[in-house]
Amino acid sequence: MPVAPPSKFSVSIKGVVLDSQQRVLLLKNERDEWELPGGRIEIGESSEECVAREIAEETRWKVATGPVLDTWMYYVDEGERHVFIVTYGCHPVSDIDPVLSREHKEIGLFARSEVDGLHMPDGYKRSIHAWFERQEV
């Protein structure tokens, strides 16, 4: 029997942040997946403001928000829910080290060559590679 498409879904705004050594900032969630920092948009804020706020809350990194990199629908098996993901390319505006918040289990900075081997949704990998490619232009 076919499954009906979702009638409701969450929206999550995520940032691909590369440090000065061209490593991407990732966070490990409760499902043991690496993910991009970010979260839900609040009433009255733009998506650019949302991603900057969420990254600061989750890592203490202040960022400048760049272009939209990708959008995609993600099905979270554990919660049996759909999330619409929007990813932005971001640049850190300070040289401090990122700090792990209580929202995640682990924090890491990864080289481009390490990304494909990480346990994370393919949409995040696609966004990360897109931002690396834009840096090469």
Image (spheres, grey):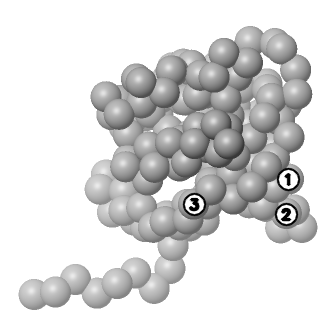
Answer few, some or many: residues within 10 Å of disc 2's Cα (few below 14, many 20 plus, some between 14 and 19).
few
At label 2, the amino acid type is Ser
At label 1, the amino acid type is Glu
Could you tell me residue 101's position as x and y percent?
Answer: 66, 24
Could you tell which of marks 3 and 1 lies nearer the N-terminus? 1
Q: Which residue is mark 1?
A: 49
Comparing marks 3 and 2, which lies closer to the viewer? 3
Kindly report the distance in space between the C-alpha atoms of the residues bearing marks 3 and 1: 17 Å
Query: Would you say residue 102 is visible in this rendering?
Result: no
The foreground one among 46 and 68 is 68
Answer few, some or many: residues within 10 Å of disc 3's Cα (few below 14, many 20 plus, some between 14 and 19).
some
Residue at 31% of width from left, 52% of height from top?
78
Spot the residue most to the left: 1
Q: Is 3 placed above or below 56 here? A: below
Q: Are marks 1 and 2 in contact (CB under 8 Å)?
A: yes
The foreground one among 40 and 114 is 114
Kindly report the distance in space between the C-alpha atoms of the residues bearing marks 3 and 2: 17 Å
Q: Which residue is mark 3?
A: 70
Left or right? Give the position of 31 relative to 94: left
Residue at 34% of width from left, 84% of height from top?
5
Task: Assign a secondary structure to mark 2.
Answer: loop
Q: Which residue is mark 2?
A: 46
